Structure formats: C-alpha cells, structure tokens
Amino acid sequence: MDTSDSAPRLTRRSVLESGVAAAAVLGFAGRVQAAPSPAPHAPPALAAEAATPRLPVTLQVNGEARPLDLDPRTTLLDALRERIGLTGSKKGCDHGQCGACTVLVNGRRINACLTLAVMHEGDEIRTIEGLAEGDRLHPLQAAFVKHDGFQCGYCTPGQICSAAGMLSEAKAGWPSTVTQDLTAPVSLSDAEIRERMSGNICRCAAYPNIVAAIRDAGGAPTRL
C-alpha cells in the first residue's frame, strides 16, 4: 500500500516555520524564568511611618530631662509608655473619654492620649510615678490606700493625677457647674468632687471610696 500521499511533506518552509516557533517558545520561557519575583510591599501604614521624618524633642518628665527622637504624630501617652517606659499612665479608650491616661502638665491635668508629645517640649510633665517622694506616698496615694479607692487599679493612676490637679483648681477658687456660691472659697462637698472628677471613669464602680479618699486628702497640703 502506498502511503506517500498521507505522510507530511518536509519542505524548506515547514522547517523554517518550526524553527521560528520553537525559538519564540524557548525565548519566552527563558524570560519568564529569569524575571525577578516582585518584592513584597510594606503595608501602607508602615510605609508612611518609615517615610515620616522624625523630630528631636526633650521632655521634662518627673523632674528629669528625657531626650527623644519621635515621629511627630506620637502622642504624649505613647511617648511616656513606649519610649520612656513610664507605664503607670494607662491607655484605656485612647479617645479622651475615660481619663485613665491623665497626667499633669505644668500643674494642670490633661488627657495624654489627646496631645502630641512634640507640643510639650519645655513643659513640666508629672506622671503617677513622680508623685511620691521616695518611699513617702503623696497624700492622695495614701488616701486611696486608706479608703480602698480602687479595685482592679487600672484607672487609679489617672484618678490620682486628676484628683491632684482638681485639688489645685479648687484651692485656686475655680468653680464648677455645681458650685453654689461663686464668691466664697470652694467647699469640696461630695457633689463638687463627683462633678470635678466626672472625666475619670472607674469600671469597677469604686466611686464612693474614690470620693472619700479625695475628700480626706483635700485637707492635706498638696505639692502640685
């Protein structure tokens, strides 16, 4: 049987076409194999942080100069806790609603989570760690112990710092919304203390003991 008609004919053109096709396939495969794998991309937040210039700032904390190199977006609370290691000031809500992060700046109480660290160069910052003098507790610290003004203790540093600032405000004659007589010295009634401390939340609800502790310490001289 003659099969010459069914067999493919080998011609010059078919040889050239096959060679060109093979070269193209091999060349493409080589390029795909040689192409470097794409570098992993950093998350946008980390990339932005890495690109943000850092600023030198020296914070005066508890009577000591603390030089830092900070991202200008760093809050005072994060600078105190993460960079200086003063973890007494607590991060609760991180939105200025609970008061757990309260510290004293130039004698006035502020929420450390709502202010930037770079804004406070030259200010006198005092945290809960700076209230006692060695082994001698601040009058408010001693009163909180005496009256059991805490349970879990998470809010306690902010409560005490806020109370220290509040007692100074009352001593200076600053009225509150419940002050009855604006011409007389402020009397620290339970209503006054509760109103003035309303920015500090205790999830354990130790408020009666907190009020008793502040009322007790209100007659003691304060250093702030």
Image (cartoon, rainbow, N blue to C red):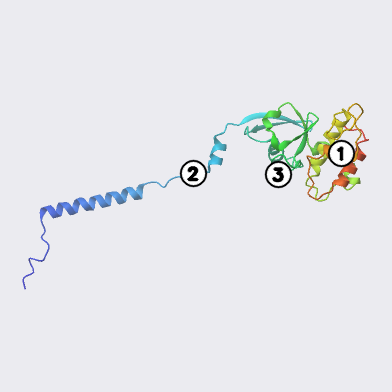
- Identify residue for label 3: 93
* Residue 136 seen in the current view: no
* Residue 104 seen in the current view: yes
Residue sitting at x 14%, y 55%: 14
Q: Nearer the viewer, residue 191 or 115?
A: 191
Q: Nearer the viewer, residue 73 or 111?
A: 111
Q: Residues under labels 2 and 1: Cα distance? A: 53 Å
Q: Residues under labels 3 and 1: Cα distance? A: 23 Å
Front: mark 2 or 1: 1
Given the image, on which type of amino acid does mark 3 rest? Cys
- Identify residue for label 1: 193
Residue sitting at x 24%, y 50%: 24
Near mark 3 (Cα within 10 A), the count class, few <14, some 14-19 or many ≥20, is few
Looking at the image, is mark 2 or mark 1 earlier in the sequence?
2
**Residue 139's image quarter?**
top right
Q: Nearer the viewer, residue 107 or 37?
A: 107
Give the secondary structure at mark 1.
Answer: helix
Left-right relation of 189 to 157: right
**Rendered image: mark on residue 41:** 2
Q: Are marks 2 and 1 in contact (CB under 8 Å)?
A: no
Given the image, on which type of amino acid does mark 1 rest? Ile
Residue sitting at x 83%, y 38%: 195
Left-right relation of 189 to 203: right
Looking at the image, is mark 3 or mark 1 earlier in the sequence?
3
Residue sitting at x 87%, y 41%: 141
Looking at the image, is mark 3 or mark 2 earlier in the sequence?
2
Q: Residues under labels 3 and 2: Cα distance? A: 31 Å
